[in-house]
Amino acid sequence: MSSTKKKKISLFQRGAAAAERYTGTSDLYMCPICGNAFNMSDLLTAKLTLEHIPPSSVGGKGIALTCETCNKTAGYTIDAAVSGRADVINFTNVIANSESSLGVKACLQIGEDSVNVQVLCEEDGTVNFLILGDSNNPCTVERTSAYMERLARDREGDGEVLHVVSRARYHGRMAQVGDLKTAFLAAFAAFGYRYALDPRLELVRSQILHPCEHIIDGWSVALNLPEDRQYMLMITESVTGVVVKLDKVGVILPWLESRSDFYGELARTYSPNERLQLNGKIVTWPTRLEMALDFYQSAYSEQKKGMDLISERK
Ligand SMILES: [Zn+2]
């Protein structure tokens, strides 16, 4: 049996055991986004799929299962936006900061012509444009090369502007819905169904299921948290919620003690671009289905104690 298959089966079994209080059997895994129940044969026929958190295109690991509909249909648009945004950030790092890396694809625009290139930066800051033979019209390449040679030879190019444009495009709000999905699923892996299926999370799940609709707002938060690593922060001062810290951004989610109008209350309390100074307990990023609230009863019955338990046992 392949290691991926073994992993999926073990995620299924852990999830199904946690879902028993909802399904009445330990044979059904519930998709944390839509709440539908699936059996083992659905896993084998790929109706239930391994979900990478964050998406695999930005380095996520498979730590939960979601149904095919939530993973592929609803997920495709938002995952594409998340990976498009990562490409744009990479492009900016290469171009603006001469960050040497494997290079980034871009479009070099000269007059009417535009040529697909690979941008490569060297350690001394030299930026090279490598023309991609396969993805260009040969006539355009010939014209552009002749133009560049003339520029270099005659030094006539004073004041000439060359445009270098990223080939990546992404939908800003869609990428934010992608962050919301990553944050929600990470919180599901850490806390379990008792968290994910709580009525306070209903609008979050609905927004992930319907990425093109405008259901909630205000989950992206600017943070004064310097490190790049991913973790969660349980907040009890000023607001009660969970901040899921992704690479560069933070996502705030309701906690079980939050008011039902969580995002409305946030919007009334904070101005849109205000940097939140948030203090709380750090919960480390889940590496599997921890589901602390499902498996540790005391964590649920006494919330304060539960938070200690969650953060101390890692
Ligand atoms: Zn689903």
Image (cartoon, grey):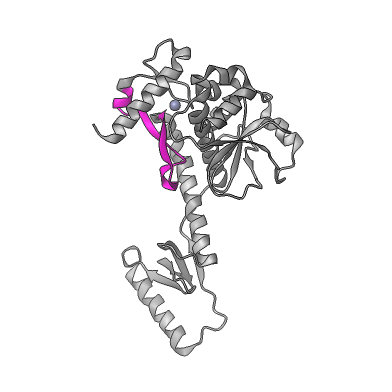
Q: Camera-side residue: 271 or 76?
A: 271
In this view, the residue in front, 308 or 194, is 308
How many badges with numbers are in the image? 0
Residue 152: x and y in percent read 45, 85
Specify the quadrant of the image occupied by residue 18: top left
**Is residue 156 within the magenta segment?**
no
Q: Is residue 72 among the parts visible in the rendering?
A: no
Q: Residue furthest bottom?
A: 154
**Residue name at image x 51 percent, y 20 percent:** 296
Which residue is farthest top? 24
In the figure, 141 relative to 242: above or below?
A: below
256 sits to left or right of 162: right
Q: Is residue 163 above or below residue 303?
A: below
Q: Quadrant of ligand 1?
A: top left
Foreground of the two, 191 or 207: 191
**Left or right, residue 242 beside residue 35:** right
Task: Give coordinates of residue 111: x percent, y percent.
Answer: 49, 73
Question: Based on the displayed image, in which of its 4 quarters is residue 234 positioned?
Answer: top right
State which region is magenta.
Answer: 42-66
At a point 52% along the width and 56% down the height, the residue shown is 89
Q: Residue 145, position in %: x, y?
A: 39, 78
- Residue 155 percent across, percent down from the top left: 49, 88
Farthest residue in the front direction? Answer: 312
Is residue 204 in view from this perspective? yes
Instruction: Point out the image quarter for the N terminus.
Output: top left
